[in-house]
């Protein structure tokens, strides 16, 4: 990816991609990780890539009618939650930089990005032998690999190796990774203010 694209992805919070072939267990792992990260006081936002059309609204509801009538965006809110719906006609794929910008006002401690394999972001790659091919391990942005078998020869670089089914060890790695990234972000912000 280009240097310009890397700059667009600069965010005031750590961004960690979780990449894997379908069927590897991304959602199952995230369901275990999110409570553990929350117990450590981390507010974690998640951006999930969908490979198909989806709708969070229901036909017949007022918000659906208003969005269909042209409201862009359509925000519906209650005391329990809110949902922002934005039509993106003609867009081939979601723009991760734009999605991260939407999260800035929420000030998360970490954003986990599920999918978006081709984007230049640090990644935790999950690999289960027999599901997909090992080429996913050769991405230069891979910082850790959680595996169900020994590391295949296709893996490159100095990525940390973790056991795929040990969610506690993976949570500990993520927590330490966030601390390291926050220290780097803090150092960068301090040096920018001193200029």
Image (spheres, helix red, strand yellow):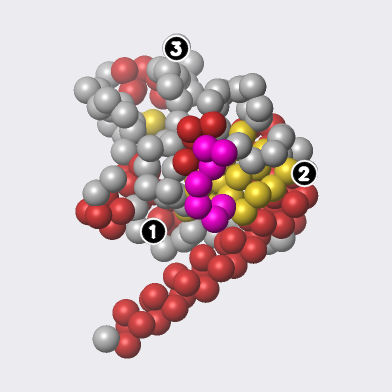
Say which residue label 2 marks: 166
Say which residue label 1 marks: 11
| Residue 151 appears left or right of 86 | right
Closer to the N terminus: mark 2 or mark 1?
Answer: 1
Stretch in magenta: 153-159
**SS for dot 3:** loop
Tell which tag, 2 or 1, sits nearer the viewer. 2
> Whole-percent x and y of residue 22?
56, 23
Queried whether the magenta region covers residue 189, the answer comes back as no
> Whole-percent x and y of residue 104?
41, 56
**SS for dot 2:** loop
Closer to the N terminus: mark 2 or mark 3?
Answer: 3
Say which residue label 3 marks: 59
Q: Quadrant of the N terminus?
A: top left
Residue in the picture at 34% in, 22% down? 66
Residue in the picture at 51% in, 65% down? 181
Q: Nearer the viewer, residue 97 or 23?
A: 23
Q: Quadrant of the C terminus?
A: bottom left
Q: Mark 3, residues whose alpha carbon is within 10 Å: few (<14), some, or many (≥20)?
A: few
C-alpha gap between disc 2 and disc 1: 29 Å
């Amino acid at each position: 990816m280009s240097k310009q694209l890397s700059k667009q992805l600069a965010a005031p919070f750590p961004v960690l991609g979780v990449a894997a072939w379908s069927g590897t267990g991304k959602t199952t792992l995230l369901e275990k990780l999110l409570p553990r990260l929350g117990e450590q006081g981390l507010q974690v936002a998640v951006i999930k890539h969908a490979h198909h059309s989806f709708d969070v609204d229901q036909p017949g509801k007022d918000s659906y009618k208003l969005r269909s009538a042209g409201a862009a965006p359509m925000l519906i809110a209650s005391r329990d939650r809110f949902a922002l719906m934005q039509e993106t006609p003609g867009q081939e794929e979601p723009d991760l930089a734009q999605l991260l910008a939407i999260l800035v006002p929420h000030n998360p401690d970490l954003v986990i990005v599920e999918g978006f394999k081709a984007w230049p972001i640090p990644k935790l790659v999950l690999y289960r032998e027999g599901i997909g091919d090992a080429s996913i391990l050769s991405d230069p942005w891979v910082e850790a690999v959680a595996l169900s078998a020994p590391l295949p020869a296709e893996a490159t670089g100095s990525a940390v190796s973790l056991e795929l089914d040990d969610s506690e060890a993976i949570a500990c790695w993520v927590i330490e990774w966030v601390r390291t990234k926050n220290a780097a972000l803090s150092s960068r912000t301090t040096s920018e203010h001193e200029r």
